[in-house]
Image: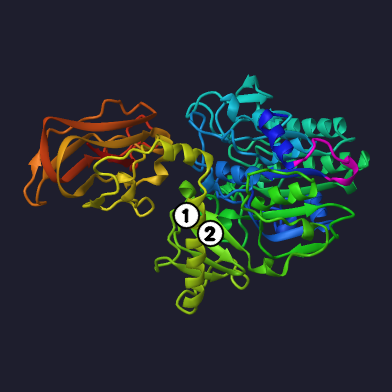
Amino acid sequence: MSIKHFLICLLLGLGTTTNAQTRPNFIIFFVDDLGYGDLGCFGNPVIRTPNLDKMAAEGLKMTSFYACSPACTASRYALLTGKYPARSGFSWVLGPTSSKGMHPKEVTLAEALQDAGYATAMYGKWHLGTRKKAFMPLQNGFDDYYGLPYSNDMIPPKWGDIALVQGNDTLELNPDQSLLTEAYTQHALAFIEKNKSQPFFLYLPYTMVHVPLHPGKAFEGKSRRGLYGDAMEEIDASVGRIRAQLEAAGLSQNTLLVFCSDNGPWLTQGINAGSAGLLRDGKGSTWEGGLRVPGIACWPGTIQAGQQWSETASTIDLYRTFCSLGQARFGDHQPDGQDLSNFILGEGPAPEYSQRTFFYYGPGNRLQAVRKGFWKLHIITNSQLQRQYFDKSPPLLFNLDQDPGEWYELSDAFPEVVNDLLAEISRHQQALGNSPGYWDQERNAARIYHKAFGKTVRFVTPPHENYPNPIALTDGWLESPEEFNHLAGFRGDSMCCILDLDSIQSVQKVQIGFLQETQSWIFLPSKVGLEYSTDGHHWTALASKQPDFPQTERSVRQGFQWTFTAPIQARFFRFSAHSIGACPAWHQGAGQASWMFPDEIIVE
């Protein structure tokens, strides 16, 4: 136990051991990119999932179960902290070179259970930080770990070598991925055998069915659904073997199993992607297909067999639920999810549960939609398929009980519902702002205050609709390249914007920042120009600036700066940045539109 968590337990008067016989074991089966329509028990006609179908028949099938993000990292953060991804303080998908990960002050579900006397293990995909030791599973509550540190497509030649990790050590680079599901299963079986006499928490975030697909040799070519079906059927077999081990060890009636996915299907991958069934869109979007996933809970002897629940539940609820059932405390850590233990124990949900509010976070961990009861309101929409499903702009309102596929838009017919849901969003955002996450607390402490802070920026050329934020140019934060989602973005277009200082000021230095993150198709401008004016009509042009970094530099932030020997008098500054237009010939997106993201304007 860490000193941090020993102190939490001490302050709460909670010992590190309790009666193991009164507390259940917990296992989470977490599949990568599995769609709502990819299991037999959720309607798939060809993918054979007999073990999961049996698990649903013997337990609880949750038909309105949600991941908390339509992408890997943010979803995993929410599951392990019980918090909405906006509290994470990092972008929604971290890469192998990301500067952030799980903040050391977060109390993960594994840490909370570990401090309550549970043995803990994780076998599979982590994706909550780089190989920096502080970000890895053993430093975040797991006694044992084996797996990949991030997504299985973050491999050469696009990325560097990917490590297969045991504990904190690299076993090998670029492993044979067809062996992974079997290896995770073997580790899980050994862990159960080793810890059958004490309570345990086992987290199995499978690498599959994320692309590239690598089913085990014994499953390859066996499914009518191709490689995707092969990989899913191997996961189903893994679940069956683990359940058999529990039965043989006499642990079935003392183990709560939860099966779900981190987000919906990755539809841009064509036949190698899964299916969202009757739901709209998939991974990357906050349409139902992006976050609503198959949810199954099974606890023989406790959860009544053959149940189906259509009320809203989420991975964000597992934290409070497991801690309640496992008699674990989490100190000042306050999860956003709800405690479902009463329902799990057969006492039924609280009467108000049918009207719970759930918030949908999309790219950049931006709030895009809200659900309350059966009503869902979109305030921002996006699609990885680049589809615009409605001519009308948000807000868009849907009745998910009657229309889970989000076909029939109802905002004009129910304006009072729209207003109620907009008020829910406002209250939620205010609450988030009043309790920032740990990375955001550090970010706020590093905020820069200068003459342009909080001043108005007007874009002469409009930014892309998904990245429209002019406030980010004068908010005092210098963003890292991986945090571009906070900013205004230009896709293939050059930029012109005007800063108004409100009055004529004496100025010694002016700077505007730009990001480059080539893996996200973001490049520095080819040149940046600056003009200044006292009245907004007569302008004085200064020499343009060119970038110091080559296009091949993967991840940089550059400030383009003008310093005056003698202070100038100015109220307005007009910046022009010339986009490179298209990704260069050496880039994987060669010839396609590149992105440009301006950052903070600093005036001193």
> What crowding class fits label 1: few (fewer than 14 Cα within 10 Å), some (14-19), or many (20 or more)?
some
Where's residue 382, x and y in %?
A: 45, 56
x and y, in percent, of residue 561 in the image: 22, 32
User: For residue 16: magenta?
Assistant: yes
Q: Quadrant of the C terminus?
A: top left
135 and 325: which is toward the camera: 325
Asked if residue 204 shows in the view, the reply is no
Give the amino acid at mark 2: Trp
| Left or right of 117 on screen, residue 393 | left
Q: Earlier in the sequence, mark 1 or mark 2?
A: 2
Task: Tell me if 558 is positioned left or right of 2 in this view.
Answer: left
- How many marks overall? 2
Q: Which residues are magenta?
A: 13-24
Q: Main secondary structure of the magenta part?
A: loop
Q: Residue at x 65, y 20 (%)?
A: 169
- Quadrant for the N terminus in the image: top right
The residue singled out by tag 2 in the image is 287
The kind of residue tagged 1 is: Ser
Q: Is residue 76 left or right of residue 246?
A: left
User: Quadrant location of residue 126?
Assistant: top right
Q: Residue at x 77, y 43 (%)?
A: 27
Q: Nearer the viewer, residue 501 or 482?
A: 501
Residue 515 position within the rendered picture, expressed as x and y whole percent measured from the top left = 34, 36
- Asked where in the image residue 205 lies, by quadrant, the reply is top right
Residue at image x 47%, y 41%?
440
Dot 2 falls on a residue whose secondary structure is loop
Q: Which mark is residue 383?
A: 1
- Residue 567 occupies quadrant: top left
